Image (cartoon, rainbow, N blue to C red):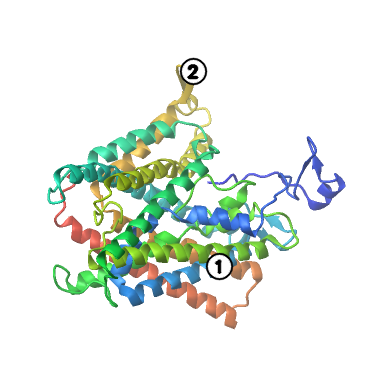
């Protein structure tokens, strides 16, 4: 994630030094290069971070809820994300909003405001979530690679040909690529990754939206109903309930960017890759904003308002046009479920863009896990030969421990992906599990501690009610996803693809 270590330089000392260091470079109060970001640049960073593969499941989510509840739930999630983002923005600095100590990462903010067991709890939730995202990305990348093969097959042999194939070989291929990339030092910090990823995510999102509009026009009108998929014709009443709940998780996954909101702030540059999970992004983006006045929190609130509004409009268009195009038949992945067959080459371009995006995004998500385990191992066995030993492979030097541990991790995520290759269910579960703790609970608790909100006051009660309500949403959404996985496992044979 972001780099938490920062040089501590007081504002007064910096002022005495004329704010000039080294080669005449301006510095901020913490000794880092002078930040120049504005509300506009922070908005751009957030939008780039938010829009990702989660957009592909929105048409399916709206299909479960219908034309009334679907857009309403999306707007509700947008409001909650915006509000809790503004709470988190207040926690970027501890103490004074203009001169207080900066918190460079989400964990720094939790440590400064809550401390104790909650820091460890936050760490466990974050790392577990990152592991889950790695599994989800492996599944998503493999079905996109498979979709390219199937699209070409349908084009050559006709749409009635089943063109069946297993996704397992593509998961293994994706895993092999990740094993190689995992050995590259600081792979997630390569400067051009953010540019490539932004281009890829907007490419496949725009293609999905365009194909949805084209299909709606070809249909001669909007499909779907006010209440979503009807019970009957292969859908039981319980399946309707569970899938409607899972839809909440899918929407939460698309919106939830809390893992990087602070990390984007932690350096003077934008995040390395779009992140489909965004509240950690508020504080990360905030760290790119120029020093007060006005305070970073005030600028960040404006940036969050603009970015959430822009993202919501885009998500509404993608989700609603996908549902309008396919109605109850909306696939759980708009570009791989073969609601579209032609133009096949455009589907190939979109799915190739997804694969390229996810190859880099996987590394961005797993690097914090790699770093944590390797720091722990180095501290636990400082003189261990296995930990410190390196192998020479041509001009490269490989750590034996890093090679072994990172390879084992990638293999583990690949095997789990092959056991549970259910994109929609995994996305819904990830969104549900991460939404309440990272997007709502910790920001609310940090804000209460930071602002000294009096226990029992009207504001305290409202914040607690919001947190409790979102906890219920997370629990029922997770239950819906788990129920759908259990239902799918009744007919699925492990490793059958």
Residue for point 65% across, 46% down = 268
Q: How would you rate the neighbour count of disc 1 (Cα within 10 Å): few for under 14, some for 14-19, many for 20 or more?
A: many
Rounded to the nearest angstrom, the CA distance separating label 2 from label 1 is 50 Å
In front of the other: 375 or 3: 3
Q: Are marks 2 and 1 in contact (CB under 8 Å)?
A: no
Residue for point 38% across, 71% down = 473
Which of marks 1 and 2 precedes in the sequence? 2
Identify the image quadrant of the C terminus: top left
* Residue 372 shows up from this direction: no
For the image, the number of numbered tags is: 2
Figure quadrant of residue 434: bottom left
Above or below, comparing residue 154 to residue 85 in the picture: above
Q: Which of the labelled discs sits on residue 395, or is there none?
A: 2
Q: Specify whether 307 is left or right of 289.
A: left
Give the image location of residue 393, x and y in percent: 44, 19
Which residue is denoted by mark 1 in the rendering?
Answer: 445
Give the image location of residue 55, x and y in percent: 39, 58
Give the image location of residue 67, x and y in percent: 33, 74
> Which residue of the protein is positioned furthest toward the top in this rendering?
394
Figure quadrant of residue 25: top right
Residue for point 76% across, 47% down = 9
Give the image location of residue 176, x and y in percent: 33, 33
Q: How would you rate the neighbour count of disc 2 (Cα within 10 Å): few for under 14, some for 14-19, many for 20 or more?
A: few
Q: Specify whether 454 is left or right of 165.
A: right
In front of the other: 185 or 34: 34
Q: Please state which of the two labelled residues, at mark 2 or mark 1, is closer to the viewer.
A: 2
* Residue 438 shows up from this direction: yes
């Amino acid at each position: 994630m972001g780099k938490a270590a920062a040089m501590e330089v007081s504002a007064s000392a910096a002022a005495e030094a004329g704010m000039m260091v080294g080669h005449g470079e301006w510095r901020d109060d913490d000794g880092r290069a002078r930040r120049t970001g504005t509300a506009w640049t922070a908005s751009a960073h957030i939008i780039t971070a938010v829009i990702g593969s989660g957009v592909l499941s929105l048409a399916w989510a709206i299909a479960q809820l219908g034309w009334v509840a679907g857009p309403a739930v999306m707007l509700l999630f947008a409001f909650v994300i915006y509000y809790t983002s503004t709470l988190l923005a207040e926690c970027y600095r501890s103490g004074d909003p203009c001169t207080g100590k900066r918190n460079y990462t989400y964990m720094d903010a939790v440590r400064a405001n809550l401390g104790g067991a909650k820091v460890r709890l936050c760490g466990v939730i974050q790392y577990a979530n990152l592991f889950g995202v790695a599994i989800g990305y492996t599944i998503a990348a493999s079905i996109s690679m498979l979709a390219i093969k199937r699209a070409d097959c349908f084009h050559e042999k006709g749409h009635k040909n089943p063109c069946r194939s297993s996704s397992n070989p593509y998961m293994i291929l994706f895993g092999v690529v990740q094993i190689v990339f995992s050995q590259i030092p600081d792979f997630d910090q390569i400067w051009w990754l953010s540019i490539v990823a932004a281009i890829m995510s907007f490419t496949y999102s725009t293609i999905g939206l365009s194909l949805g509009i084209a299909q709606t026009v070809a249909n001669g009108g909007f499909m779907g109903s006010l209440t979503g998929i009807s019970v009957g014709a292969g859908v039981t009443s319980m399946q309707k309930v569970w899938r409607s709940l899972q839809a909440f998780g899918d929407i939460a996954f698309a919106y939830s960017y809390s893992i990087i909101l602070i990390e984007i702030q932690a350096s003077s540059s934008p995040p390395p890759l779009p992140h489909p999970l965004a509240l950690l992004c508020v504080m990360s983006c905030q760290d790119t904003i120029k020093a007060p006045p006005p305070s970073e929190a005030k600028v960040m609130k404006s940036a969050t308002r603009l970015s959430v509004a822009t993202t919501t409009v885009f998500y509404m268009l993608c989700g609603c046009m996908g549902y309008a195009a396919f109605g109850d038949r909306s696939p759980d992945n708009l570009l791989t479920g073969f609601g579209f067959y032609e133009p096949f080459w455009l589907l190939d371009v979109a799915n190739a863009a997804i694969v390229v995006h996810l190859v880099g995004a996987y590394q961005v998500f797993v690097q914090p896990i790699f770093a944590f385990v390797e720091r722990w191992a180095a501290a636990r066995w400082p003189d261990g030969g296995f930990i410190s030993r390196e192998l020479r492979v041509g001009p490269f030097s490989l750590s034996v421990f890093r090679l072994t541990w990172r390879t084992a991790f990638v293999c583990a995520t690949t095997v789990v992906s092959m056991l549970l290759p259910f994109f929609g269910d995994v996305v819904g579960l990830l969104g549900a599990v991460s939404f309440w703790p990272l997007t709502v609970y910790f920001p609310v608790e940090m804000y209460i501690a930071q602002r000294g909100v009096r226990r029992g006051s009207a504001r305290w009660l409202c914040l607690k009610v919001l947190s409790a309500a979102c906890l219920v949403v997370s629990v029922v959404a997770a239950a819906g996803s788990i129920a759908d996985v259990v239902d799918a496992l009744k007919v699925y044979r492990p490793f059958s693809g």
